[in-house]
Image: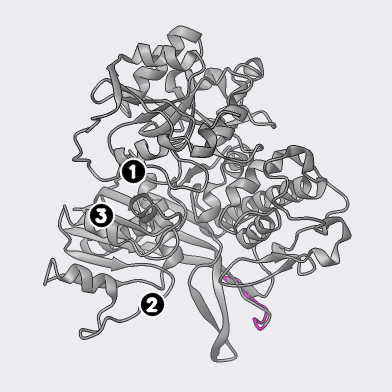
Amino acid sequence: MNILAINPGHNGSAALLVDGDLKFYIEEERLSRSKYDGNPFKGMMEALRYGVDILVLGGTHEEFPRLPWTGEDPYSGFLRKFNPNLQVINVGSAHHIGHAAGAFYNSGFDEAAAVIVDGSGTRREIDINGEFKNPGFETESIFNCDYEEGIKPVFASYGGNYDTQRVISEDTEMDSAITLVKAYEAVSEYLGFGFIEAGKTMGLAPYGKENEFIPSLFFNGRGNKNVFVPNYPAGAHVDHSRHPFLELKEDPRAWHKDPSKVTDAAKDLAWAVQDETQTLVGDLIEKAVDKTGQKNIVIAGGYGLNCVANYYYKKRFPDLNIYVDPISHDGGTAIGLAQLIYYDQTKDTEKRPLSTLYLGPERTENYDLEGYDTKDVTPADVAKLIAEKNIVTLFQGRSEAGPRALGNRSILYDPTDPNGKDTVNKVKGREWFRPFAGSMLKEYFEEWFDTYGMEETPFMMYAMDFKTEKHGEVPAITHVDGTCRIQTVTREQNEAYYDLIEEFRKITGVPILFNTSFNLAGEPLVETLEDALHTMKNCDIDYMYLPEVGKLVTVASEQTEEDSQTP
């Protein structure tokens, strides 16, 4: 049984299960080269390499546009041409269930409570005095999950615009005040980012502090209506006209490349939304425990990518077993919905914990490097190059699922360079305040970080505190608050990457490499070798390591005519 599920909206994705095992996952942006792209036709074509028996249509809408002549939706109409016996299952009204299923079935727990914190899921109408009306959109949900009963709703919170009435019951909450992710989106827009670029707000937050001139952003878990203006299902807005301290006096993007222009309002509002939202998600976790009795908690939805908050939960709840889905944004719903259908149809009870994120297409390219300068190298040679303060890209194997580079599509650098963050941010075209991650040998994890019981973090889902004695040793990947988003690596998980880090440790004594995603600002991660070479031609990075063939490629950037002129 080959089940292909798709998420057609932003972070469009395709996920394939073969007899219950996750064999393939790709986000459309990697193939189309259009950031956050939807309608994953290219991903569906990649899945056809395996064959498709069942197509599961996800998303947040039950109805899709119809094709002429046949009246089919575009996705099933396309796949039917390859399999006339294709079975199609539309679960478009199950957005949060898709998040919950992915988190639970990937966790390896026998049972759990799923906590979903999302921006805008499925549109619902609530029964008021016997009439279904009062539309709102899923924002936070709690589900009870096990292999016998499946994914069962326990509590749901909805948000709507000004025509949405307030409804409060034991298992439902709805009104026109925005909720957690929408508040984060509104602040992100206020700061000059896109609604969907909340990770940038998270990066700025540690530069801020509590500020008496910023009002409380939430009351009783709902957004302050004097601060936020709802705009469901899209983003929300900060109503700075009511708050002189927050008034925008110039383009909010003016400080993105110039730290001298950043305002206290920008920094402190970012701090406030991070602090208040992570506290409220913690309260939601407590509610989940109270309502279900579970000690196993799985987390998904867009807020699950907030690695600062994820570490906060570990510190706040030492007695809970917490699993955060590493593909917790909307793209991951494709995995969850495929699993939901599989377990529902087969009644299988076998656990299949997520063991790898190297789930991209199995490449068939043969490393055609004609016209490029190449030489044979060992991991020790490449480690020496990095230790000498050279930026080196790493390209190998299947691409990583989700937003984190985990050593197959990575840009690497020396984490001990005090100027490393500024150096690589400039090369990538990123904002000055954004931190970088690290990848380390698993056996040194507890020596370097306060792990709070974690034995490893292979999917880079936590921004963790360094041990006191390690402060200052890797300044290039240490954020202003003394944390680092870290990935642990074993030889079994990624042999070539492990060996490279080990060789770097032998040279420097540091078992960590500076690791960031192989892309430039605003672009998707590279997928193919052609993408990788194109990216390097457009930036100031000279070296690419191909461990599968033991080659180092030197790629000179393509200067514009203006750049090449002598002053």
The residue lying furthest to the left in this view is 84
Q: Position of residue 479 (x, y in %)?
A: 64, 31
Write down the residue under mark 2. Answer: 62
Magenta stretch holds residue 118: no
Q: State the residue in front, 547 or 159.
A: 547
Name the secondary structure under disc 1. loop
Neighbor class of circle 3 (other Cα within 10 Å; few <14, some 14-19, many 20+) is many
| Residue at mark 3 to residue at mark 2: CA–CA distance | 21 Å
Write down the residue under mark 1. Answer: 527
Q: State the residue in front, 91 or 148.
A: 91
Q: State the residue in front, 290 or 381.
A: 381
Residue drawn at x 42%, y 51% is 103
Q: Amino acid at mark 3?
A: Leu
Question: Closer to us: mark 1 or mark 2?
Answer: 1
Neighbor class of circle 1 (other Cα within 10 Å; few <14, some 14-19, many 20+) is many
Name the secondary structure under disc 2. loop
Quadrant, the N terminus: bottom left
Write down the residue under mark 3. Answer: 16
Q: State the residue in front, 254 or 496.
A: 254
Q: How many marks?
A: 3
Residue 550 drawn above or below residue 177: above
Q: Please report the bounds of the magenta region as a residue range.
A: 163-171
Q: Could you tell whether 424 is left or right of 230 in the image? A: left
Q: Could you tell whether 345 is left or right of 226 in the image? A: left
Residue drawn at x 48%, y 39% is 560
Sequence-wise, the earlier of marks 1 and 2 is 2
